[in-house]
């Protein structure tokens, strides 16, 4: 979602100056890249359906990597505990038992390790509408209306160039803001590469690329409900091209300002300010596997 996601004061100022509806669009679109909407389907995938979805074939698109052999990084979620040598449950610049994205003034969740659960062969990021004690950006006590979960690979894995594939189920509850994205390992934002962001009420779903603080490139998934449920989200990253994919179909192709630095992966289930009173803070983002083939 994306991401403005880093706690930069410039992002905060931009967000505060516009209303909640405009906030969804964020910043200023850049006139570069090629956005490709997903083809229409007869019905949106179920958010509670089977996780049997497997890897998608990578299409023969010029500039797109074809993953071969054993991935450099492969994460599945067997057992009952998250591997803390690879994953963390808060942003890497945060210390303590919880966090939120202070760079997005419209997010209302407080992330807690307890909302990150491993069971039934899946990673569960669980959002619940319960009053939760957290802090402000300056460390003062604050109460949040929503508690939720996130993971990052910052402690265990980052990479530069390659093919990323995440098999995940995107929830569709009103108010939820799930995202799967890459952020710079030097913790200096931008760039940011958002494989998918979805506003759970079906208003919008897209891939985003943030090369500079003041703009982004967007590849819409239309209708937005197509992003819900189980899908295979992919990203091909070479020195000359970014190709974002969903189920083997491109959603966004970028050929300029390509990041040339190590990045790490984040998956989070955010909650945004109510629009027309519609906000439930109730739902779960599921992840079956994460694989990365280095270029």
Image (tube, rainbow, N blue to C red):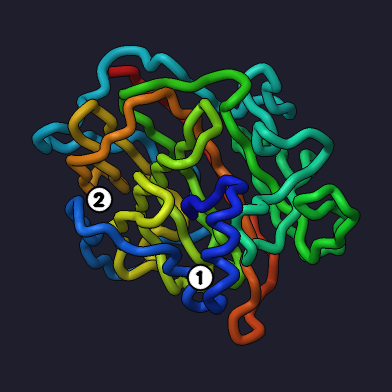
SS type, badge 1? helix
Q: Is 289 on the left or on the right of 61, as rendered?
A: right
Q: CA gap, disc 1 to disc 2?
A: 21 Å
One can see residue 49 in this view: no
Tell me the crowding category of disc 1: few under 14, some 14 to 19, or many 20 or more residues within 10 angstroms, Cα based: some
Give coordinates of residue 87: x percent, y percent.
64, 27
Q: Residue at x 27, y 66 (%)?
A: 41
Quadrant housing residue 278: bottom right
Give coordinates of residue 224: x percent, y percent.
38, 67
Tell me the crowding category of disc 2: few under 14, some 14 to 19, or many 20 or more residues within 10 angstroms, Cα based: many
Quadrant housing residue 57: top left
Give coordinates of residue 217: x percent, y percent.
30, 55
Q: Nearer the viewer, residue 14 or 218?
A: 14
Q: Nearer the viewer, residue 245 or 5?
A: 5
Q: Quadrant of the C terminus?
A: top left
Q: Is 8 on the left or on the right of 265, as rendered?
A: right
**Label 1 belongs to which residue?**
23
Give coordinates of residue 231: x percent, y percent.
40, 48
Of circles 1 and 2, the one toward us is 1
**Label 2 belongs to which residue?**
252
Q: Is 131 on the left or on the right of 57, as rendered?
A: right
């Amino acid at each position: 979602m994306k991401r403005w996601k880093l706690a930069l004061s410039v992002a905060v100022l931009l967000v505060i100056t516009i209303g909640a509806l405009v906030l969804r669009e964020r910043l200023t679109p850049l006139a570069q890249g090629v956005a490709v909407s997903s083809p229409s389907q007869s019905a949106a995938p179920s958010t509670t359906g089977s996780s049997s979805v497997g890897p998608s074939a990578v299409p023969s698109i010029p500039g797109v990597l074809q993953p071969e052999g054993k991935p450099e990084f492969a994460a599945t979620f067997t057992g009952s505990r998250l591997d803390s040598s690879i994953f963390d449950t808060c942003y890497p610049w945060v210390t303590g038992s919880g966090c939120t994205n202070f760079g997005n003034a419209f997010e209302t969740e407080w992330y807690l390790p307890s909302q990150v659960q491993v069971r039934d062969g899946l990673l569960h990021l669980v959002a619940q509408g319960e009053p939760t004690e957290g802090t402000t950006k300056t460390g003062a006590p604050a109460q949040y209306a929503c508690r939720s979960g996130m993971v990052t690979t910052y402690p265990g894995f980052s990479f530069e160039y390659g093919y990323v594939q995440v098999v995940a189920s995107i929830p569709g509850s009103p108010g939820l803001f799930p995202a799967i994205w890459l952020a710079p390992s030097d913790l200096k934002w931008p760039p940011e590469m958002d494989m998918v962001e979805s506003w759970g009420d079906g208003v919008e779903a897209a891939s985003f690329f943030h090369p500079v603080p003041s703009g982004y490139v967007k590849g819409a998934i239309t209708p937005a409900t197509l992003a819900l449920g189980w899908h295979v989200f992919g990203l091909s990253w070479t020195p000359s091209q970014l190709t974002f994919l969903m189920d083997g179909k491109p959603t966004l192709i970028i050929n300029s300002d390509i990041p040339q630095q190590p990045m790490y992966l984040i998956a989070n289930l955010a909650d945004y300010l109510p629009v027309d009173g519609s906000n439930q803070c109730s739902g779960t983002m599921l992840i079956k596997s994460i694989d990365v083939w280095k270029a």
